[in-house]
Image (tube, grey):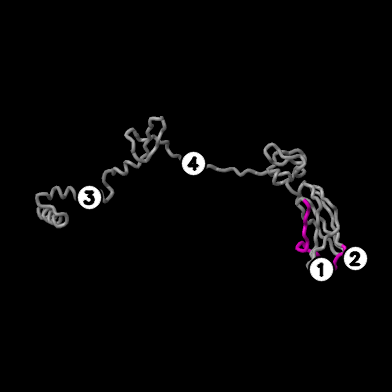
């Protein structure tokens, strides 16, 4: 049986690779190594051994690193082990001046560029140049229309910067804006009242809403 097996193997090698009967043993060994290498179970290949990191120092004392051993003086580099860990980030609670009397823009910026509160608190998060560059006007209230056709718009300045030359415009049904009568400035965190007079335009037919009002100021 063994003799028949080697005879068939020798025949297959001769047909496939051109081996003679006298070279059958060499062919068997060669075929064994080819099969072993193709299966990936053989000894580590040269390319795998060269996948490390090498280092060497040149004549100028400069240390080089490379994945290829291109210099005769290159040696396997000793690299630190890669460790893995989890870092938990603590959410920082940003402080404001809401509980400290508001932002005092007249006090200037703190050393770190943040704002200073009215009670002297300096650890607030808002940046001075963003918070104190302009006032911010908001409609606080719109009154009902009285029997004379008048209504009042209360405007609040939510910043500590004085609002210069504030203007409230009412967009009438005709589309022409009407400027309401009011103060020429609104202090920081202050309010101002602007009155619509019936003789300036047609009396609104219904309650006035925010979409019919426009706020402006000279330094907004």
**Secondary structure of the residue carrying numbered label 3:** helix
Dot 3: within a 10 Å radius of its alpha carbon, few (fewer than 14), some, or many (20 or more) residues?
Answer: few
Rounded to the nearest angstrom, the CA distance separating label 4 from label 3 is: 44 Å
Dot 1: within a 10 Å radius of its alpha carbon, few (fewer than 14), some, or many (20 or more) residues?
Answer: few
- Is residue 198 highlighted in magenta? yes
Of marks 4 and 3, which one's residue comes earlier in the chain? 3
Rounded to the nearest angstrom, the CA distance separating label 1 from label 2 is: 14 Å
Frontmost of labels 4 and 3 is: 3
Residue 85: numbered disc: 4
**Magenta segment:** 197-218
| Above or below, comparing residue 10 to residue 149 in the picture | above
User: What residue sits right under mark 3 in the picture?
Assistant: 34
Taking 53 as reference, is 147 left or right?
A: right
Which quadrant does the N terminus fall into? bottom left
| Above or below, comparing residue 113 to residue 1 in the picture | above
**Secondary structure of the residue carrying numbered label 4:** loop
Rounded to the nearest angstrom, the CA distance separating label 2 from label 3 is: 106 Å
| Residue shown at the point (77%, 43%) measured from the top left | 101
Question: Between residues 24 and 156, which one lies in front from this camera angle?
Answer: 156
Quadrant location of residue 145? bottom right
| Residue shown at the point (73%, 39%) measured from the top left | 121
Taking 37 as reference, is 74 left or right?
A: right
User: What residue sits right under mark 2 in the picture?
Assistant: 148
């Amino acid at each position: 049986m063994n003799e028949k097996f080697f005879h068939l193997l020798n025949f297959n090698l001769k047909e496939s690779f051109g081996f003679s009967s006298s070279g059958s043993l060499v062919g068997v060994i060669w075929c064994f190594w080819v099969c072993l290498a193709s299966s990936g179970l053989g000894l580590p290949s040269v390319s795998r051994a060269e996948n490390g990191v090498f280092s060497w120092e040149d004549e100028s004392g400069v240390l080089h690193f490379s994945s290829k051993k291109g210099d005769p003086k290159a040696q396997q580099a000793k690299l630190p082990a890669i460790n893995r860990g989890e870092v938990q980030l603590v959410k920082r609670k940003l402080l404001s001046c809401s509980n400290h009397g508001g932002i005092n823009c007249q006090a200037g910026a703190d050393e770190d560029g943040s704002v200073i509160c009215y009670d002297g608190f300096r650890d607030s998060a808002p940046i001075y140049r963003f918070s104190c560059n302009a006032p911010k006007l908001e409609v606080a209230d719109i009154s009902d229309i009285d029997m004379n056709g008048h209504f009042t718009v209360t405007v609040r300045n939510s910043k500590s910067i004085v609002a210069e030359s504030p203007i409230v415009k009412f967009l009438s049904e005709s589309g022409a804006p009407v400027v309401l009568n009011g103060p020429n400035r609104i202090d920081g965190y202050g309010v101002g009242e602007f009155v619509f007079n019936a003789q300036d335009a047609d009396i609104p037919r219904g309650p006035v809403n925010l979409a019919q009002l426009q706020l402006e100021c000279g330094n907004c």
